C-alpha cells in the first residue's frame, strides 16, 4: 500500500504520540519498532440500541450481537495504540463515544462521515479528527480499511 505525503505525515504523528498500553517495543533514541508478532486481531460488532451506539468485542460477544450489527475486524499493533479496522462495504454505524479524540486515516475504500451534522466525503489518503464525545455516523460505500489512533484534544 502506497501512503503518499498525507499518509506518511499521519503515521509520523501517530508514532510521536507514544504507546497506548505497556507492551514491549524495540526502542532507540530515534524511535520505536513494534514487531508484527505483537499484533492482536479482535472481532467486533457495532449497532445502535435505542439510538445509542453499542459495540461487542471478542468472538463470543460478537456472536451474540444483533443480526443487523456491522461486523468488523480490528487489528491492534503492539503498544503503539494504532488500530486498523476492516469494514465491509454498505456498512453504516455510529462509532461509540469515548473520552479521547480519534484521528482516522482512510487507507482504502470510500467513506461518508457525518461529524455532528457536517457531512464529509473521504477518499483514500484523507484524514479526519473526531471529538471523542461527539455523535458521528460513518457510512462505508465499499470495503474499507481505516487506521485510527487516540490523540490529545486540540486546545480550544
Image (spheres, rainbow, N blue to C red):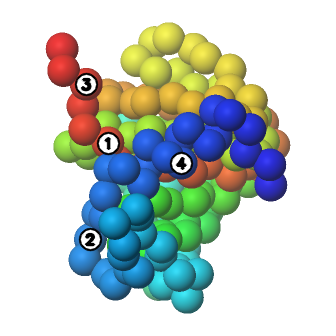
- Give the label on residue 125, or none: none
Nearest-to-viewer mark from 4 and 1: 4
Q: Secondary structure at mark 1?
A: strand
Structural distance between the alpha carbons of marks 3 and 4: 18 Å
At a point 25% along the width and 25% down the height, the residue shown is: 154
Q: Which residue is mark 3?
A: 154
Q: Quadrant of residue 100?
A: top left
Structural distance between the alpha carbons of marks 2 and 1: 14 Å
Structural distance between the alpha carbons of marks 3 and 2: 22 Å
Q: Secondary structure at mark 2?
A: loop
Structural distance between the alpha carbons of marks 4 and 1: 12 Å
Among numbered discs 2 and 1, the one appearing first in the sequence: 2
Structural distance between the alpha carbons of marks 4 and 2: 18 Å
Among numbered discs 3 and 4, the one appearing first in the sequence: 4
Q: Is residue 50 visible?
A: no
Is 88 left or right of 9, judged from the image as shown? right
Q: Secondary structure at mark 3?
A: loop
Structural distance between the alpha carbons of marks 1 and 3: 9 Å
Is 28 left or right of 82, judged from the image as shown? left
Q: Which residue is mark 4?
A: 11
Q: Quadrant of residue 106?
A: top right
Q: Position of residue 21 (x, y in %)?
A: 26, 71
Mark 2 Cα shell of 10 Å, populated few (<14), some (14-19), many (≥20): few
In the foreground, 86 or 2: 2
Among numbered discs 3 and 2, the one appearing first in the sequence: 2
Q: Please identify the quadrant where the N terminus is shown.
A: bottom right
Verify CB contact (< 8 Å) between mark 3 and mark 4: no
Q: Which residue is mark 1?
A: 151
Count of numbered badges drawn on the protein: 4
Mark 4 Cα shell of 10 Å, populated few (<14), some (14-19), many (≥20): some
Verify CB contact (< 8 Å) between mark 4 and mark 2: no
Q: Is residue 106 above or below residue 45?
A: above
Amino acid at each position: 500500500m502506497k501512503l503518499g505525503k498525507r499518509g506518511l505525515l499521519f503515521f509520523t504523528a501517530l508514532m510521536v504520540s507514544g504507546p497506548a498500553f505497556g507492551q514491549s517495543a524495540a526502542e532507540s533514541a530515534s524511535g520505536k519498532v513494534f514487531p508484527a508478532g505483537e499484533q492482536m486481531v479482535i472481532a467486533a460488532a457495532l449497532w445502535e440500541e435505542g439510538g445509542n451506539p453499542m459495540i461487542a468485542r471478542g468472538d463470543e460477544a460478537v456472536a451474540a450481537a444483533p443480526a443487523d450489527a456491522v461486523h468488523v475486524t480490528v487489528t491492534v499493533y503492539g503498544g503503539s495504540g494504532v488500530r486498523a479496522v476492516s469494514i465491509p462495504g454498505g456498512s453504516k454505524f455510529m462509532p461509540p463515544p469515548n473520552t479521547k479524540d480519534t484521528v482516522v486515516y482512510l487507507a482504502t475504500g470510500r467513506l461518508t462521515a457525518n461529524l455532528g451534522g457536517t457531512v464529509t466525503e473521504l477518499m483514500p489518503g484523507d484524514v479526519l479528527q473526531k471529538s471523542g464525545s461527539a455523535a458521528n455516523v460513518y457510512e462505508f460505500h465499499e470495503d474499507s480499511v481505516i487506521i485510527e489512533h487516540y490523540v490529545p484534544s486540540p486546545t480550544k
